[in-house]
Image (cartoon, rainbow, N blue to C red):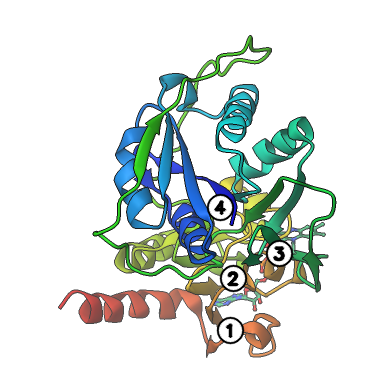
Amino acid sequence: MGKILVFAEHTNGKLKRSSIELLQAAAKSGNTVSAVVFGSHAADVAAAAGQNGANEVHLFKDASLDAYNPELFTANIASAVEKIQPSIILASASSVGKDLFPRVAARLGAGVASDCTELTISGDSVTATKPMYSGKCFAKVGFENASLKIVLMRANQLPVAAADAGKSASVVEQAVAKPDLKTLIKEIVKGTSEKLDLTEANIIVGGGRGLKEAANFKILNDLADVLGATVGASRAVVDAGWVGHGMQVGQTGKTVAPSLYIAVGISGAIQHLAGMSGSKVIVAINNDPNAPIFQKATYGIVGDALEIVPKLTEEFKKALHH
Ligand SMILES: Cc1cc2nc3c(=O)[nH]c(=O)nc-3n(C[C@H](O)[C@H](O)[C@H](O)COP(=O)(O)OP(=O)(O)OC[C@H]3O[C@@H](n4cnc5c(N)ncnc54)[C@H](O)[C@@H]3O)c2cc1C
């Protein structure tokens, strides 16, 4: 058996669900699981990484690794690979993962499969499935002539079991590589949202042009608050300037796979479906019974969203807060 390096992403020391998925999948394969954690809060992640399947946790504890810098992260992943000698790297197909690991692959002569939705590990060989042409077909990807194989998985694709509080990992503090940088992050301006990022959200309420005007997004925010959901949007309303591009779901927006996606006043154009058809349960609210979204929906409500959504919010409030 070989070693699997899992790049464990976290938010201020809280392990992301997408990384928990990877740690548990790696642990199931019977390989040794080495979690690599970056940033000043890295040590806070060690216990959770162990409880979710890591055998060892390698901490690259330094404030310079708090914000993503491609050169710095590439150098430190390369140094982790040198120390750990994994045959497989698993990481999230997050915006960081998708930028970082092709660089790592180029530097180390590794193979990389990005944006995958299924994963099979057998010994030190790995195959993955990735959607192509906006999900119209699926490619099975294997590796040849690559001693290091990198798979980037979309979030919410792998099952997550409860953490095992009885398990722990050995913790190794690693020296942080500080190469001369050609680019520097000067400042990070945070968005105002405290909600989970769309790609990590378990429940999403998506709004489209059927909401009529920007102000009506308030009824989606109210519903999302009650459900603990994140609000997304179609491109039509992003282009109209009702909401920011960070909220766009679809081919030219974010790809999401929550347990529940509630599409409100969204027609279900192929480019929107490309971003959300992997959702486990889809509820569509639309006043046109022939809207294409109903062909993908698990449940459909035909009617005026502006009337239905506030009623749903009231009912969920009663059902969930008693
Ligand atoms: C290259 C390319 C990339 C694209 N990428 C994306 C992408 O990433 N994401 C994306 O979303 N789109 C994308 N699009 C745009 C896409 O083709 C659609 O135009 C867009 O998704 C439509 O948004 P919508 O469903 O909000 O609006 P519409 O298609 O106008 O649909 C509005 C829906 O609301 C319903 N409705 C109206 N009034 C009410 C009411 N009172 N109550 C309930 N329902 C009501 C209508 O019946 C209709 O079905 C892309 C297009 C191209 C060409």
- The amino acid pointed to by label 3 is Ala
The reply to whether the residue tagged 1 has its Cβ within 8 angstroms of ligand 1 is yes
Q: Residue at x 59, y 84 (%)?
A: 297
Give the label, 4 or 1, closer to the camera: 4
- Marks 4 and 1, Cα distance to the nearest angstrom? 23 Å
Query: Which quadrant would residue 122 be assigned to in this image?
Result: bottom right
Of the pair 129 and 190, the residue shown nearer to us? 129
Q: Position of residue 219 (x, y in %)?
A: 40, 65
Residue at the disc numbered 3: 128
- Marks 4 and 3, Cα distance to the nearest angstrom? 28 Å
Residue at the disc numbered 2: 210
The reply to whether the residue tagged 2 has its Cβ within 8 angstroms of ligand 1 is yes
Query: Which quadrant would residue 180 be assigned to in this image?
Result: top right
Q: Position of residue 139 (x, y in %)?
A: 81, 68
Residue at the disc numbered 1: 287
Which is more N-terminal, label 3 or label 1? 3
- The amino acid pointed to by label 4 is Met
* Crowding near the residue tagged with mark 3, few <14, some 14–19, many ≥20 C-alpha atoms within 10 Å: many
